[in-house]
Amino acid sequence: MKNDRTLSQLRVLGIMSGTSLDGVDCALCRVGPGVQLLHLWSVSFRKPLHRRLQLAARGEANSWELAQLHHDLGRFYATAAQHDPTGHRAQLIGLHGQTVFHHPHRTRPATLQLGEPAYLAESLRVPVVSNFRVADLAAGGQGAPLATLFHQIHFAQRGEHVCVHNLGGISNVTSLDWRRGAQPRVLAFDTGPANVLLDLAMRHFTDGRETCDQWGAFAFQGKVCEPLLKKWLRHPFLRQAPPKSSGRELFGEKFLQPALAEMQRLRLAPQDFVATLTEFTARSLALNYRLHLPAPPDRVVLAGGGTANPALCNAIQREMKVLNQHVTVTRSDEHGWPAKSIEPAAFALLAWRRWFDLPGNLPATTGARRAVLCGQITAA
Ligand SMILES: Nc1ncnc2c1ncn2[C@@H]1O[C@H](COP(=O)(O)OP(=O)(O)O)[C@@H](O)[C@H]1O
Ligand SMILES: [Mg+2]
């Protein structure tokens, strides 16, 4: 049933916390039909909450703890949203929530994002759209990626093949090939890990003092171990054809533990191990481009927290040049979109579309049977 809302501009707050488990990014946007960023802020997860989320994402939280976490996170998001210093009140909220389980490939697919939206609706007294992924999953899709429409609206360029590449915990690409035709040809999928293994390794080597390889300092000091890298590059996910999406299930602790054992066997220094992981992200990304994109890109726009890691960005740039020596690699900041703004802004757009009964998924990229309304509304 259609609602009777007339399409109009709204101030929408997009709230995103991704697989890195670093915290939440909030983007207050003016939406309708494009998106304009008004303000961006982030709130980190404190250690105990990070730890609980990590256990939940590993399948080590029991049902009572999951329920408690769902509500604790809901309250956390509500507090984070109130940090808005602009005084421009949001009229609608798009809450992604925290993924603790994402298995779209099973015979019985499932995904779960935690974070009870009722707390946001109650404290800000505005409607909240959340649980974006399930409608796509129910329609036979992967439930991901969902930022694709945003990438298309803001980055597609007629006459060019542009790739928007997000370096979050997981690495994902949106290929917008508009070299010909009235519309860009869109492909979007995960290419493997971006930061998740780097973060886990850094926490491991520093007993939790360092949460990431700050500015790539460790990687810059290390030497890539080619045999180990070659072995990792044989991971079946990299060759699997899209649509495909991944998470900590594939590239989390389960990947890291045997990798650390190999590291000991090969007597690698932690710096070498981190350098090899950094190279793995860059090379797995390039391998995916080679195998699964219609052509090498003319332009690559990097986004997400990984853009703050120059060791990673340099390696990606080098790999992209191998694919196309004329490629231009930029960061989303250079296009007016700070690295951490794109994902929350994309969920602001999706919330706006859900509010006005417009579909949010691109079936060609998620594998869904049809375009569906993404998100469920919690009234205020
Ligand atoms: N200064 C930095 N140096 C290196 N890596 C960084 C830096 N700042 C952020 N990162 C990386 O970015 C990640 C967060 O990126 P983000 O886009 O929020 O990912 P996600 O969506 O998975 O949460 C951090 O976990 C970290 O690995
Ligand atoms: Mg994050």
Image (tube, helix red, strand yellow):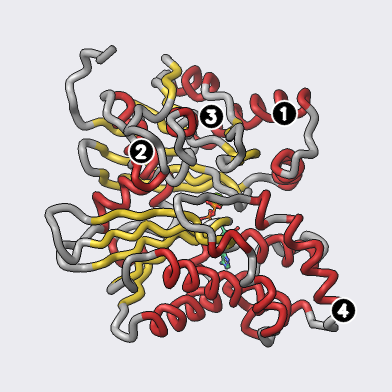
Q: Is residue 222 above or below residue 155?
A: below
Residue 279, image x and y in percent?
Answer: 59, 77
Q: Amino acid at mark 4?
A: Arg
Q: Which residue is mark 1?
A: 66
Q: CA distance from mark 3 to mark 1?
A: 18 Å
The reply, left or right, for residue 24 in relation to residue 274 is left
Q: Earlier in the sequence, mark 4 or mark 1?
A: 1
Q: Which residue is depicted at the point 45% across and 50% down?
A: 243
Q: Circle 4: is it few (<14), some (14-19), or many (20+) Cα within 10 Å?
A: few
Q: Amino acid at mark 2?
A: Asn
Q: CA distance from mark 2 to mark 1?
A: 28 Å
The part of the image, by quadrant, that contains residue 71 is: top right
Residue 83, image x and y in percent?
Answer: 49, 38
Q: Name the element at disc 3.
A: helix
The part of the image, by quadrant, that contains residue 260 is: bottom right
Q: Which residue is mark 4?
A: 265
Q: Which residue is depicted at the point 26% across and 62% down?
A: 177
Q: CA distance from mark 3 to mark 2?
A: 26 Å
Asked if marks 3 and 2 touch (Cβ < 8 Å), the reply is no
Residue 286, image x and y in percent?
Answer: 47, 73
Q: CA distance from mark 4 to mark 2?
A: 45 Å
Q: Which residue is depicted at the point 33% across and 42% down?
A: 362
Q: Is residue 21 above or below residue 125?
A: below
Q: Earlier in the sequence, mark 4 or mark 3?
A: 3
Q: Which residue is mark 3?
A: 78
Ligand 1 rendered quadrant: bottom right
Is residue 89 something one can see in this rendering?
A: no
> Furthest-front residue in view?
107
Q: Nearer the viewer, residue 205 or 143?
A: 143
Q: Name the element at disc 2.
A: loop
Queried on whether the Cβ of the residue with tag 1 lies below 8 angstroms from ligand 1, the answer reads: no
Q: Which residue is depicted at the point 53% across and 29% down?
A: 78
